[in-house]
Each structure stands twice: as structure tokens, then as C-alpha cells.
Image: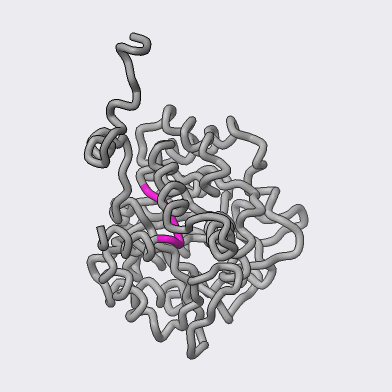
Amino acid sequence: MAYPATRMRRLRQTPVLRDMVQENTLSMDDLIYPIFIEEEVDAPAPISSLPGIMRHPEKDIAKVVKEAEELGIRAIILFGVSHHKDTSGSDSFKKDGLLARMIEKSKDAAPDMCIIADNCFCEYTDHGHCGIPSDDGVDNDRTLENLVKQSLVCVEAGADMLAPSGMMDGTIAAMREGLEEHNYGNMPIMAYASKMASSFYGPFRAAAGCELKGDRKQYQMNPANGREAIREALLDEAEGADILMVKPGMPYLDVLRDLRDYTQLPLAAYQVSGEYAMIKFAAEAGALDEEKVMMESLLAFKRAGASLILSYFAPQVAKLLREK
């Protein structure tokens, strides 16, 4: 029916009416908080390009994780700032390496927290690439061999979920095979399924110490390709992924929304460092209301089909929701 039988404003007249018919809501069950941990340092280091975010010293892991839990954060993903880098990123698949230690200490501090391991090598290699270098870029299959080793170390350290982010072909299949062989078939995998070669990662690379010469365009996706992004994600599903992620977030809401029509798996979106930084710096300049834009941006992911959102805003959201 058309106007006046239909008046769309009828259900917008009061706060209660608006809340009653709101299609999407945000809760702490939706959010995953990225945390940076640096070894061999004594004090937290602010990250100038990520206002409010720190590189936390390894000795403070228990404190940082417990504080997150007390805020109501239920899941974290750990990124290591390594001082023991080499060509293959071997520290990340050592049982006493930084990645294993971060997981173990986090789990000991907060047993009920979902501890997610970022499974990649860029933070642990001296060249900054996500795998073993070769004459034509990165050696896909040799990198997969090391990724399986890394995955097993993470599981044995106490990880609740694995999140491979390197965009190597066959990643999920290799991890699934390795996990099954060692009786870890129940370990969930959240695939960085559609990860673009994006310029929005800049602040993260500074934070995690994984800058590199050149780029990652041989393995991360062309930002112009939406159909290819769906294909990548569906391949990960076929190989055994449990959750599919789109990264970055807001610039690729179309990919997230399209993917929702192709799969029944839970979807995740990563509101990456550049997205966070833009909101923060715009708010500092007085150009927008940080709290309102923060919440609007996160609801956009839910509206587009995300079940989970990785966001540096998680502590702020937790405080805001608690106040309400």
C-alpha cells in the first residue's frame, strides 16, 4: 500500500518503538579484540597511528587479558611483536616461542576467554612476508608445511581457535589434515577467507613490526575483485573452515553481504587498523562524533551479515554497553 495507508514514520516516533523494531543489535558476544604483545620490553608502548592501542610487554599479558575479561570481552586474537625473526618465521612454530607463550599465558590468566591464534608468519620473519620467500615471491607449499607446525604448537599451547591469515592456497586443507592426524579434529578454524591487498593495513604493520619492501599482491587479493573474493571464501569452506572472514571491513561490505547469500557458515569482518584510525583521528579533529560513528560502523557489519567483528574498539564498546 502507498501513502497515506503506509506511513513509514509510524514506528520511528518514540525510542521504545524504534528499539522494538530494530533489525540488528550489537553485543559483546559479537566482538573479538586484537591485542599486541611484544617480547623483551618492560613497558607498554603507545602506537602513534592507533590512538589508544598499545604494544603490551609480555610480562603484562595476564593483566591485559584479565582487564579485557572484566570489561566483558569474551574473545581476543593475539599478535606478537617478535625480536627473534628469521627467514621462515621459525620462532612461531617453536613450543617455547613467543606465539606459544602468548597463548599459554593468556589462557592461564583467563580460562573462560576464547583465545584465538593469528596463524601467519609476517610478524616473525625478517623480510615481512607471510611465508618462505622464493624467486617468484612466496613458496606456497613450503609455507603450508610450516603453517601446520605452527598450528599444532598453538593448539598444544591452549588456543581455542586458529585464524590463518596468510592467504596461501590450500591453507585450510593443510591445517585440517595436520590437526586430524594429531587428534585435534575439533579445533575451530576462522579463515581469513577474503583478504585484500589493502592500503588500510598501514597502522597494523607499524604496530606488529611487519613492514616489508614490496607488497603482498601475489597472495592477497586484488581489491577490485568481488567475485574472486566469494570464490576464495567458498574454497575455504570446502576445505573445512568453520568461520569465513572478510578483511578489511567497511570498504568491502559488498563482499560480506554477497558472501552471506552463498554460505550458511558464520561470517566475520575485520574492522582493520586503518578504519579504526580514520575514525579516531577524525574525532580528534572534531569532524565527527567518535562514539556514534563507532557504533554505526559496527552495526553496518551486522547489517551486512557478520556474526563476528574484530575491532580495536572492543573495550570502548564494552564500557558503553555497560553504561546502558
Residue in view at x 49 percent, y 71 percent: 53
128 on left or right of 272: right
x, y (%) of residue 169? 57, 45
Q: Nearer the viewer, residue 320 or 233?
A: 320
Residue 204 visible in the snapshot:
no
x, y (%) of residue 287? 57, 56
| Quarter of the C terminus within the rendering | bottom left
x, y (%) of residue 199? 66, 53
Residue in view at x 27 percent, y 64 percent: 72
Residue in view at x 55 percent, y 68 percent: 50
136 on left or right of 227: right
Above or below residue 55? Residue 220 is above
| Quarter of the N terminus within the rendering | top left
Picture mark count: 0
Identify the image's colour scheme: rainbow, by chain, secondary structure or one colour.
Answer: one colour
Q: Nearer the viewer, residue 61 or 188?
A: 61
Residue in view at x 32 percent, y 68 percent: 158
Q: Which range of residues does the magenta coloring cover?
A: 308-313
Residue 311 inside the magenta-drawn segment? yes
Residue 123, image quadrant: bottom right
